[in-house]
Image (cartoon, rainbow, N blue to C red):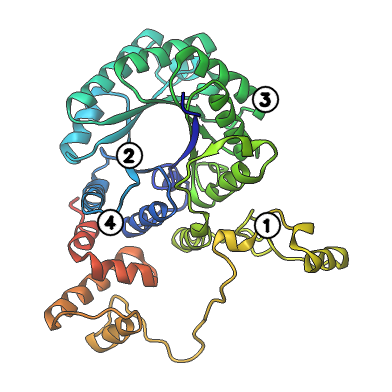
Amino acid sequence: MAKPKIYLIDVTNRDGVQTSRICLSKLEKTMINLYLNEMGIFQSEFGFPVTRHETNYLNANLELAKAGALSPIRLEGWIRATKEDVRTAFKLVPQIKHLNLSISTSDQMIVHKFKGKLDHKSVINEMTEAVKDAYKLGAESIGVNAEDASRTRMDYLIEFSLAAKDAGAKRIRYCDTLGCDSPFTIYERIKLLAEAAGIPLEIHCHNDLGLVVANSIAGAKAANDAGVDAYINTCVNGMGERAGNADLVSVILALKYAGSMQDYQLDEQINLKMAWKICKYASYAFSVPIPINQPGIGANAFAHESGIHADGALKDRRNYELYDFEELGRGEPEIIETGRKITAGEYSGIKGFRNVYEKLEVAFVDDAEAARVLELVRYANVHNQKPLVDDELKFIAQHPDIAHKIFTMNP
């Protein structure tokens, strides 16, 4: 029997963008997907198939996947576990193949959120019918989310999970929706659930008590100890509702370097060298600075000032550094223009635009192609409401038809 693994499912483009007071443009969400793919992440929860302003973005990203530009990462949408949401999802995004269906399972939410609309039995019936319908309409893999799993009675959570498995679900998402678990409780509960249901488990934790990474690692360990694969949900830079979700880079570092976790098998596709690039981009896109003490990525993560520490680090980095900054894609100097700077914005003309793309070593076949890309770059600046980064400019030139679709909304 193969040793169980730990995979990462990043939810920046779903839970991350639900963070109050912040948002991402559809181009920025697309760039996050491209960077996650380069980073070797198993799956991106890339949006909401029943939310109409997402429709063109979702379909465009699925076209990128079909063309091989977003591969091998899987693109998965989040919907409620209802037949209505399933039908709407496949109507608006016909080519979607991977879905997570979500419904509340705790007594608290069944009683005080559904308010008599659903009881414990009908929650399971609603979920199983939705799963079956999704497969009939073309889904290839479905994860079922037990919202508020950490406050759900264990006997009911097992019953719910077995019903989902029987309906064809590939994974159960254990949602610590309020961030109320501890590493000890989540380990015990997930181990019991995995042993009873015999199905791979997703670990979806929140940081309300500051335990999100510890809980995610403990949950994954429990699933593997019970003999099933684990899928940790992450967000770049720990974004997410309220106090956030598990930080992508912190989770990877913990899996690689925390005590005893070397005995567990992290997805071998993970490329940590992308960490610096994706975290800096997400910080710019979200307009949220990276804290200086952020693990691995913060400005002080490899900074030493006190005499003892500086002396020790200079003698041997292992004295005061657990891992190497190069492993995270850090160490190269970054050039900042301090003289003349030509930028491509919403009011750019063709000469300035060409100058920008010449510096990026991007050539156009003819004037017509250049004019078309210029028009798209203008729209992209309006779309983002901030200057475009080099990779965004390159993406638009490389995939103009996809970019056009991403920028288009039909209210």
From the viewer's perspective, is the residue at label 4 or at label 2 nearer?
A: 4
Of labels 1 and 2, earlier in sequence is 2
Instruction: Choose top left, top right, bottom left or bottom right for residue 101.
Output: top left
Residue at figure coordinates x 29%, y 35% from the top left = 98
Horizontal and vertical percent position of residue 215: 61, 33
Q: Earlier in the sequence, mark 3 or mark 4?
A: 4
Report if the CB atoms under discs 1 and 3 are less than 8 Å apart: no
Please state which amino acid type lies under the numbered disc 3: Phe
Callout 2: 10 Å neighbours few (<14), some, many (20+)? many
Q: Residues within 10 Å of mark 1 (few under 14, many from 20)?
A: few
| Above or below: residue 190 compared with residue 285 | above
Q: Secondary structure at mark 2?
A: strand
Residue 293's disc number:
1
Residue 379 appears anywhere in the view: no
Marks 3 and 4: CB-CB under 8 Å?
no
Q: Position of residue 60 (x, y in %)?
A: 22, 52
In-front residue for pair 56/306: 306
Residue placed farthest to the front in the image?
A: 1
Residue indicated by mark 4: 69
**SS assignment at label 1:** loop
Mark 1 and mark 4: span between their CA atoms? 34 Å
